[in-house]
Image (tube, rainbow, N blue to C red):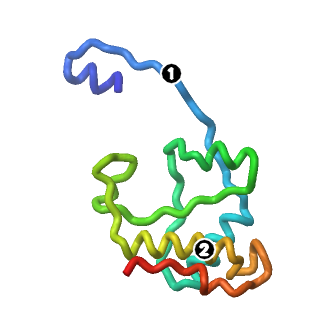
Amino acid sequence: MRAALQRQSLKGDVRCVWEAPGVSFDPLCVTAVREATAVLGFDSMEMVSGAGHDSCNVSAVVPTSMVFVPCAGGLSHNEAESALPADLEAGANVFAARDAGVGGSLRSRTSWARWLVRTN
């Protein structure tokens, strides 16, 4: 930022007013999300989020992981954020399958089909 100010011959300064350490989510929960995604046949990628999600605070109290869905243009944390109903459905189903233990990481296998979400 300082270099950009200097390049534009602008005056200003930058100071850090808040900083939060990174959070590592519970490996068992992350594995459960990975397994649920695979069992349901969805494409996935693991990513690091720099946003201060509620789950960062929750993870200090209970085992936690997150599921993201694609948003139009990659835009998130903005009032213009939008996602397709099918992507929201897929994300909800990953949560449901994860919680039902379909991959075996969190719980023994259960009948999880009743948890599937449909948007139509």
Q: Amino acid at mark 2?
A: Ala
Indicate whether 55 appears above or below 115.
above
Indicate whether 58 appears above or below 20.
below
Name the residue rendered at 30%, 62% in the picture. 72
Determine the secondary structure under disc 1. Answer: loop
Give the tally of numbered discs.
2
Place of residue 35 in the rendered image (x, y in percent of width and height, measured from the top left): 64, 77
Indicate whether 36 appears above or below 67.
below
Disc number at residue 89? Answer: none
Question: Within 10 angstroms of label 1, few (less than 14), some, or many (20 or more) residues?
Answer: few
Give the labeled residue for mark 2.
Answer: 96
Place of residue 106 in the rendered image (x, y in percent of width and height, measured from the top left): 76, 72
Q: Quadrant of the N terminus?
A: top left
Q: Hey, which quadrant is residue 103 in on the image?
A: bottom right
Place of residue 31 in the rendered image (x, y in percent of width and height, measured from the top left): 68, 70
Indicate whether 67 appears above or below 113.
above
Determine the secondary structure under disc 2. Answer: helix
Q: Amino acid at mark 1?
A: Val
Name the residue rendered at 50%, 73% in the picture. 44
Give the residue at the far left of this rendering: 8
Q: Does residue 76 appear left or right of residue 56 in this picture?
A: left
Q: Does residue 37 appear left or right of residue 30 in this picture?
A: left
Give the residue at the far right of this rendering: 108
Query: Disc 1 vs disc 2: which is toward the camera?
Result: 2
Nearest the eye: 65 or 89: 89
Q: Mark 1 vs mark 2: which is more N-terminal?
A: 1
Name the residue rendered at 28%, 59% in the picture. 73
Q: Does residue 109 appear left or right of residue 55 in this picture?
A: right
Give the labeled residue for mark 1.
Answer: 17
Q: Quadrant of the C terminus?
A: bottom left
